[in-house]
Amino acid sequence: MVFLKEDGNLDIERINQLPIEEYMKMIGELSDEQLIQYDSTFPKNDGTQHTTPIMVDYTLEDEIKRGGVILKDYLKEKMKKYGIEKR
């Protein structure tokens, strides 16, 4: 379900207040045009902005059990599978 205002535009404030799981599901449901509209609301990063942490109530081990991966291990596996050597 995509949150829209009465004028048909995305309700950015409401989307940004969703819990992380619902937010990720919502972003996955956006059309290409809606995603472009959503991305256009972000300020340009001029190198002075820092990463914003997202607090969750589960551990890394829980996330791995749910299907999450550690990027380093994933890339290592794919490089081995496709015969790509480190530079």
Image: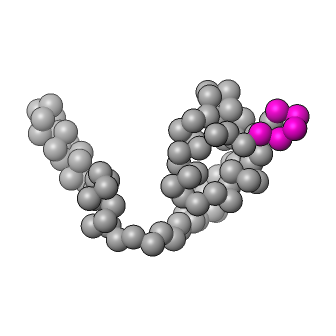
User: In this rendering, is residue 86 above or below 61?
Assistant: above
Give me the residue at 83% from left, 41% from top.
5
Left or right: residue 5 compared with residue 43:
right
Q: Is there any visible trace of residue 10 in the rendered image? A: yes
The structure residue drawn at horizontal position 64% and vertical position 40%, both measured from the top left corner, is: 1
Q: Is residue 81 above or below residue 43?
A: above
Question: Residue 21 colored magenta?
Answer: no
Residue at point 74%, 48% (across, down): 12
- In percent of the image, x 64 and y 52: which residue is there? 45
Q: In the image, residue 32 lies at what x, y percent?
A: 61, 27
Between 62 and 75, the residue placed more toward the observer is 62
Residue 31 vs residue 70: left or right?
Answer: right
Reply above or below: 42 against 59: above
Q: Is residue 8 left or right of residue 22?
A: right
Q: Quadrant of the C terminus?
A: top left
- Seen from the viewer's position, the closer of residues 23 and 44 is 23
Name the chief secondary structure element in magenta.
loop
